[in-house]
Image (cartoon, helix red, strand yellow):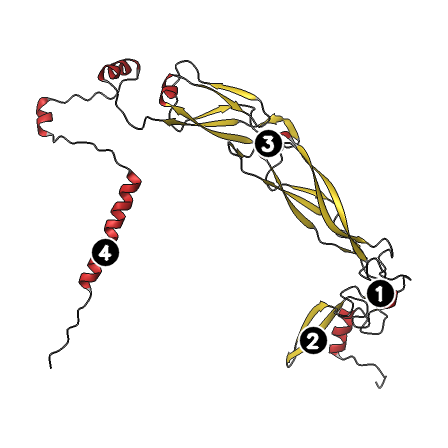
Amino acid sequence: MGGSGSSHNPFDIFESFFSGASPFGGGSRSSRRQRKGEDVIHPMKVSLEELYNGTSKSISLSRNVICPSCNGKGSKSGATSQCSGCQGSGMKVTIRQLGPGMIQQMQHVCPDCQGSGDMIDEKDRCPQCEGKKVVQDKKVLEVHVERGMQHGQKITFQGQADEAPDTVPGDIVIVLQVKDHAKFKRKGDDLFVEHTLSLVEALCGFKFILTHLDGRQLLVKSSPGEIVKPGQYKCINDEGMPHYQRPFMKGALYIHFAVDFPDSGSIPPEHCKALEAVLPPGPAVELTDMELDECEETTLHDVNFEEEMKRKQQQQLEADDEEEDDSAPRVQCAQQ
């Protein structure tokens, strides 16, 4: 069969495909799909009080918008010509042959048209955008922070990011960043606060005022005769964080108690007897005279444990250094 036909160089096929033209003469891919622009991520710092009460904040952002003078054409007359370097695709492909049957193709933005796919005559360029088709604009957004929102939660403004020809604008995404609070810690919808009691308060009762995140004064007090242990937790229901989108429901407020014991001093024996009369009895230990005679009496000393451990570590390091010095081989010169 001797019918005539056209042959195609594989390099031409690759290049024409990525440049936008049909490799088999079927016209050009001039109709472009609108692509989605990139989203803009913007962190916004908020306090725990603002997440508890809710707030609104205004932020100002710079973004690109379609040039109002040329309507995104880039030229005064509205005329553009297709870039000959990329055939209007905005991208160019470089193809290299690495070996027999092996090729490498690299796609990059067309340097002639800067990815726009169009060429604008220098004399016809729009004076406002200078042929760039977009101009800078200030955008002020009103961000509504709802009660109970979390650290890292996103507030999205759809289609408010940079504009560009043949492009659907992306979104502006506000990401909440919660600042550390001096008093309260948050875990989910619960709040935690640390409070230190004196030994007298832990044994005989306490009463103190806690200022909440909305400014309310909470009176926190123990029950009569109640003893609070070091490290103990107490809970106040419905005084935690509001639930997001259900602000009338709240988590719990947990108070973690520490007890401050006296640093030094002693209790007179007569006061010890009074304390023994009201405190729970200790373990009963009765020793006979014979058992006492067989025991060696000891003396307790005050000690700073951290400093003691540092001192022992330093002593161990010095001992190790001396041991290395003693074990090092010694070389003596031979007498001639």
Q: Position of residue 220 (x, y in %)?
A: 49, 20
User: Is residue 73 found left or right of 284 in the rendered image?
Assistant: right
Dots 1, 3 in contact, CB < 8 A: no
The answer to whether residue 284 shows anywhere in this view is yes
Hey, what amino acid is under mark 4? Asp
Q: CA distance from mark 1 to mark 4?
A: 79 Å
- Local packing at callout 2 (Cα closer than 10 Å; few below 14, some 14-19, many 20+) is some
Query: What residue does disc 3 label?
Result: 49
**Residue under the image location 25 percent in, 17 percent down:** 272
Q: CA distance from mark 4 to mark 3?
A: 55 Å
SS at mark 2? Answer: strand
Hey, what amino acid is under mark 2? Ile
Hey, what amino acid is under mark 1? Ser
Query: What residue does disc 4 label?
Result: 320
Query: What residue does disc 2 label?
Result: 95
**Residue under the image location 66 percent in, 79 percent down:** 97
From the viewer's side, name the closer residue of 237 and 43: 43
How many labels sit on residues?
Answer: 4
Q: Position of residue 78 (x, y in %)?
A: 90, 61
From the viewer's perspective, is the residue at label 3 or at label 2 nearer? 3
